[in-house]
Amino acid sequence: MSQENTPTYPMPMRGMLLLIGMYTFAWAAFFRYFGPDLLRWFSMDKGFVASASPTTMGSVGMLVGFFIFLSAFYPISWRYLTLAGIIGKILILAWFLGQFLPELGWNKRTIFHVAFSEIFWMIPLIVVYFRALKVKKYLENQT
C-alpha cells in the first residue's frame, strides 16, 4: 500500500487536544471558583444576582477538560475520552443555554462565550476524533 493512502495522526492533532483540554478546563475553573463574578461580568450589570449556581457546571466542565487533555496522550486508544469530551462540551453548552442564558440575555459577552468557548472548539475536536477513528480502522484492517 502506498504511503499516500495511509492515514496518519500527526502531532499537531495531539497538540490541539491538549489546547482544547486546557482551554475547557480553564473556562470551567472560572465558572467553578469565580461563578457569581463571572456571571455578573457576562450580564454586564454590576448588580446582577443569578438564581442558579455555576459551581456544578464548572466542576463538570473541569472534568470534561481533563478528559480531553488526557486523551491527547494516547489519542487512538483513548478515543472514547475524546468522544466523552465532545459529549461533555455539548452538555456544557446546553447547560449554559438552558440555565444561565435566560437570565443573562444575549449580549456580546454571552455570544463570545457560546460561539468561541463552546462551539468553535467543538469543530477541531470533532475533526480530531474522526481522524482517530480513521487511523484505528486502518490499523485494525492491517492486522
Image (cartoon, rainbow, N blue to C red):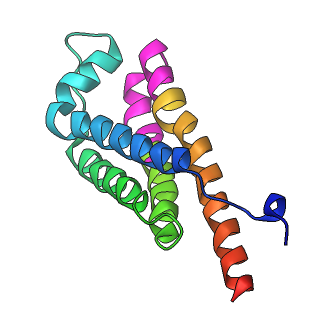
- Percent from the top left, x then y, of residue 116? 51, 28
Q: Main secondary structure of the magenta part?
A: helix
Residue drawn at the location 66% of the way across and 68% of the way down: 135
Is the C terminus in the top left, top right, bottom left or bottom right quadrant? bottom right
Asked if one can make out residue 51 in the rendered structure from this viewpoint, the answer is no
Residue 68 in the image, given as x and y percentages of width and height: 41, 55
Q: Residue at x 44, y 56 (%)?
A: 88
Q: Residue furthest front?
A: 2
Q: Where in the figure is residue 46, as x and y percent of width and height?
A: 21, 10
The residue lying furthest to the left in this view is 33
Q: Nearer the viewer, residue 71 or 103?
A: 71
Question: Against 77, is 14 above or below?
Answer: above
Query: Looking at this view, is 5 or 15 the one in front?
Result: 5
What segment is highlighted magenta in the picture?
A: 94-113
Residue 116 among those drawn in magenta:
no
> Residue 66 occupies which quadrant of the picture?
bottom left
Q: Residue at x 67, y 83 (%)?
A: 140
Magenta span contains residue 103: yes
